[in-house]
Amino acid sequence: MSASGSLEFLAVAATNADARFAPIARSPLAGAAAAAGARFESRDGWSVAVDFGNVAAERQAITETVGFGDSSQLGKLELQASGEELAGIVAGACGGEAIPLQFGTATAERAVWWCPLTPSRVLALCPPASTAGLRQRLEAAAAQATGAASVTEVTTLYGALTLAGPLAVELFARFCALDLRPQSTPLRGLRPGSVARTPGLVLREGVDRYLALFGWALGEYVWSVVDDAARHLGGRPVGADALASGESQQAEVGTGA
């Protein structure tokens, strides 16, 4: 038996546009980004902060110090099923390919991060344009489960920030209790815990690149904490364009904005 999630209001891709109005989703960090000088563009149904007026300086921050940018537009889907069936459902959504689901480690496959949260829960993170298709594949695979299984879009349950640059770990240390040093959090390491004194999750996407998830309603608060800490390190906010260029330089490829 399978059941899809009932929280349809969380599904950004489920909105219906007509000829007069095409709804655009906004991040919970949009207000703070706008106050910092962000320039926005509509991309894949989202109003995205693409830059802060100086892409070269933003790229330099990612290379030399640290930059942080809004990644809340990432698609987020939560799959729940018994441990035995969970792996089968994920594999079904990936064309039959088995995906390792080991607690504490995420797996990148086909531009999707598969993040095991518990033995019966997996969070999938994907580019916003891929959210609807991934959800459909997961729901089709979950429908074949013999036990209870559910797929819920939780995109607007979590805000997200990408922190990138050689001082990213130092920046985290100023507001986060998690030990993100390389010896404690290797590449693809997945760490649940306190992010700015709120429940959160941190994924090490690349050598100097991390994705932090936190409660949607706390977006502006988390931005203010990270911004204050970053400026003491010579860091700055960066847009999606700088993050995309920085991602291509990372040894590990994640689900960049």
Image (cartoon, helix red, strand yellow):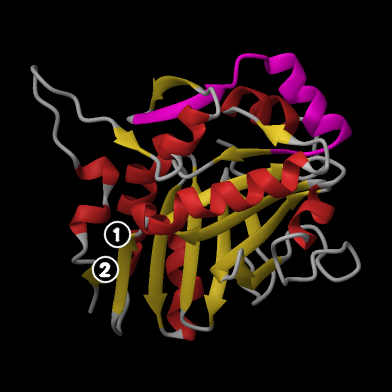
* Residue 66, magenta (yes or no): yes
Residue at x 48% of width, y 40% of height:
127
Q: Which mark is residue 44?
A: none
Please name whichever residue, 82 or 257, is drawn nearer the observer in this view of the structure: 257
In this picture, is 115 found above or below 222? below
**Relative horizontal placement of residue 208, taking residue 4 as reference (left or right):** right
Q: Label 1, label 2: how many angstroms apart (C-alpha)?
A: 5 Å
Residue beneath the point at 49% across and 70% down? 122
Percent position of residue 129, x then y? 40, 34
| Residue 170 position within the rendered picture, expressed as x and y whole percent measured from the top left | 84, 54
SS at circle 2? loop
Residue 97 visible? The answer is no
Q: Quadrant of the N terminus?
A: bottom left
Residue 256 falls in which quadrant of the image?
top right
On screen, 253 above or below 43?
below
Q: Quadrant of residue 142?
A: bottom left
Q: Which residue is mark 1?
A: 140
* Residue placed under numbered mark 2 in the picture: 143
Apparent side of residue 43 relative to residue 209 in the rendered image (left or right): left
Closer-to-camera residue (8/217): 217
- Disc 1 element: helix
Q: Amino acid at mark 2?
A: Ala
**For the residue marked with disc 1, what is the amino acid?**
Ala
Q: Residue 155 lies in magenta, yes or no?
A: no
Is there any visible trace of residue 229 in the rendered image? yes
> Badge 1, how many Cα within 10 Å: few under 14, some, many 20+?
some
Few, some or many residues within 10 Å of mark 2 (<14, 14–19, 20+): some
Q: Is residue 151 left or right of residue 100?
A: left
Q: Quadrant of the C terminus?
A: top right
Labels 1 and 2 touching (C-beta < 8 A): yes
What is the x, y in percent for residue 147?
A: 30, 85
